[in-house]
Image: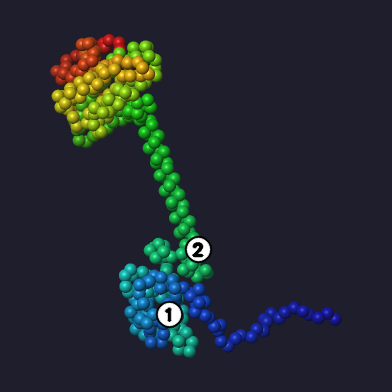
Amino acid sequence: MTQDHTLPTKALVAVPRKGPALSLAGLDMLMPLHIWIGPTGHILRVGPTLQKLRPDIEIVGRRASEFLEFRRPREVQHLDDLLAFEGQQISVLFRDPPRNSLRGLVVGLPRGQGALLNLSLGISVAEMVRDYGLNSKDFAPSDSTVEMLYLIEAQSVVLQEAKSLNSRLLGARVAAEERAFTDTLTGLKNRRALDHILNRLTNSRRRKRFGLMNVDLDYFKSVNDTYGHAAGDHVLQKAASIFVEETRAEDIVARTGGDEFVIVLMNCDDLTKLKTIADRIIERLEKPISFEGAECRISASIGTTVSSFYPTLEIDRMCSDADAALYQSKNHGRARSTIFQPAALAQPKQGLKAPEA
């Protein structure tokens, strides 16, 4: 006959008459946001995280109703008022600013030792973690807040990486746009950039005053033919430096062709000033430019017009008129500047062909 070794459905277990004793250190670990309220309603002890929320306040010894404003239940004057909500969720606010909101549960302690209020940060956890510098050690290991902290930290890392990536992409985009709008040889604006700027001036709600100066280098072809393209590149770079030095930071200098340049002088339609700038540029360009022992000689012909000549601002017409003035400079011996004559606006244009450079 075999013996039955199976256990009974319900094992007989001796249930202790007293609950387990819990050290204060264990209490702090399990409930880092607890408040121990004594029979008289005074606070006997607080958890380390709760003290961290109010580091400059002596919490122990104060009446709980003076430290906390009870929202649920609302009327708490005595310990019995609080214990009436034992096992139910309660809501409190700090009475001193910042008035953070906390939620929790209250349980009565045996042998008339008062009550234990176990609190949590509730929906304001993200703000309080940030404001008080809390971390996972400030919460019970089983608290779901710890998982939320990990999520917040992960989100912060992701956002930081995204911000860094966006910054790099923006930087790369700006650099790419800058390259797309820059003449690689001289560092000046190119034709694309100039068109963009002139269109912006045309479409501006408030009409802008500006001068438009077309510049063509004289005798540049002979420099290339005599000394080579390296010398020609050097001359172009030197000419670009002169244009920039003789204009202001707000002005636009662009290289639009091999030896062709356009200067937009912002907020300037004074013909005398424009003529002075043009003549000064020509004077500087006529000085020999040294390159590997050779003296490269060039000059410039310049044609200028201003926005105030035109009742309706038309960039194409302005550029055409500046070209016409430039060709007049060429046809009258080069190395000179010409201001477009507004009277010509009412007359049919006569083609002026510039002599070869």
The secondary structure type at the circle numbered 2 is helix
Q: Residues within 10 Å of mark 1 (few under 14, many from 20)?
A: some
The kind of residue on which mark 2 rests is: Glu
Disc 2 designates what residue? 147
Q: Residue 263 versus residue 310: which sits nearer the camera?
A: 263
Residue 354 appearing in the image: yes
Estimate the x, y position of residue 157 in percent, counting from the top left.
46, 54
The kind of residue on which mark 1 rests is: Arg
Estimate the x, y position of residue 259 in percent, counting from the top left.
32, 19
Tell me where residue 49 sits by quadrant: bottom left
Position of 42 compared to 216: left or right?
Answer: right
Taking the spot 38% from the left edge, 27% from the top edge, the residue there is 184
Q: Residue 246 versus residue 210: which sits nearer the camera?
A: 246
Taking the spot 65% from the left edge, 84% from the top edge, the residue there is 13
Disc 1 designates what residue? 45
What colour scheme has been applied to the protein in the rendered image? rainbow
